[in-house]
Image (cartoon, rainbow, N blue to C red):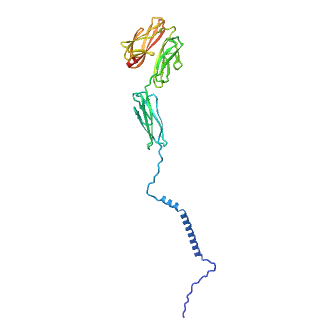
Amino acid sequence: MLTSAVQEPRKEHKRPGESDGGKGKGKAVLIVGLVCIGVIAAVVAMNYDRLFAQSEAAEPTGQPVETTPAPNTVPVILSVTAATDRIEPSDLCQVSCEAEDADADALTYTWVASRGDIIGAGATVEWSAPDTEGLYSLSVKADDGRGGIAEFSTSLRVKANYAPEIVSLSSYSDWALPETSTFVSCVATDLDGDKIAYEWSATAGEVFGQGNAIVWVAPAELGAYSVKVLARDAYGGESSREIPISVTPGTAPTLGEFVVKGIGTDLIKYFEGAWSIFRGRTCSIECVVTEGEGPYTYAWSAAKGKLTAEGAVARWDAIDGKEEVTITVDVTDIRGNTTRGTVLMSVQTCTCHFK
């Protein structure tokens, strides 16, 4: 009789204290994992608010981000300056605006005048003054293009400049020996109170000194010469006059006052060293010799106008414009000594001058 035997699995018996290696390792990994999860959860809990805020900030909202522009600084006008403080009627005067902008913006300028015309553009322009004297307003705006505008106004005076007036021009003597000297002085006034500068010259010889008085040294050659003075103010107004001085080997003829009379007109008069005559009028001029040895010869000349002469008397037709004209005569005695005399004629264009 056949019998079968079933073998039971063989059981291994652990010794007391011996652990299961695989299961023990799994449990250890599980424990470490739980600890890490706990730590991470704690960190997240402690930083929840910060992480939430960053998350919100990172999320796109779909709205444009607005930035606040830097505030604009208004320009500042430092000054408005005219090229001169004496502006003639109908004259052109340069005017400049000095301005600055803290933002370094490019500035545009707008000029407005109460009268007259503005010529040009930018920080420097020209003002065409009106033809009448007075006080006028000129204003300028400086615009930075970003809403900042500065404005400045000033006053400009239009006033005619009066040229200096020569009251007298005199010399210590009207003749001199060759290479000797004589003193010459000028008296001039200015209605505007401007400072007067003097410029001296001579047809020959040398001029020494400056101001309203100089010393003239005569040349070696005999003859009739002139010393001239130009009186000028700082605004271009000027007047001139000359005085004759003869260089002779001996005493030259002495001349008296010239006798000037109108021919067919009473619009002529003597005023402060000059004869005034209305334009286009005619006068006679007589040279008077008070001392010397005759007979005399007379040589007449005029810078402008028509002059005809015979001996000691000349006839002169005035020019049409307002101007001063010098008429000259050289008087020579029998010994060849010559004295030069001059008459200053001031031509006027208004009859009111003779009232």
Determine whether 78 is above or below 341 in the image.
below
Q: Residue furthest right?
A: 16
Quadrant holding the C terminus:
top left
Spot occupied by residue 217 in the image (x, y as percentages of width and height): 53, 15
Q: Residue furthest front?
A: 355
Residue 250 at x, y = what percent?
A: 51, 8
How many numbered marks have been drawn onto this rendered protein structure?
Answer: 0
Q: Is residue 333 above or below residue 202?
A: above
Residue closest to the far left: 264
Residue 78: percent from left, percent from top: 48, 37
User: As rendered, which of 52 and 319 lies closer to the eye?
Assistant: 52
Q: Nearer the viewer, residue 204 or 278?
A: 278
Residue at (41% x, 14% y) in the render: 269
- In which quadrant of the rendered view does residue 86 lie? top left
In the depicted view, which residue is nearer to us: 317 or 136? 136
| Closer-to-camera residue (178/354) | 354
Q: In the image, is residue 117 above or below residue 269?
A: below
Give x and y (percent) for residue 223.
48, 11
User: Where, quadrant-wise, is the N terminus in this rendering?
Assistant: bottom right
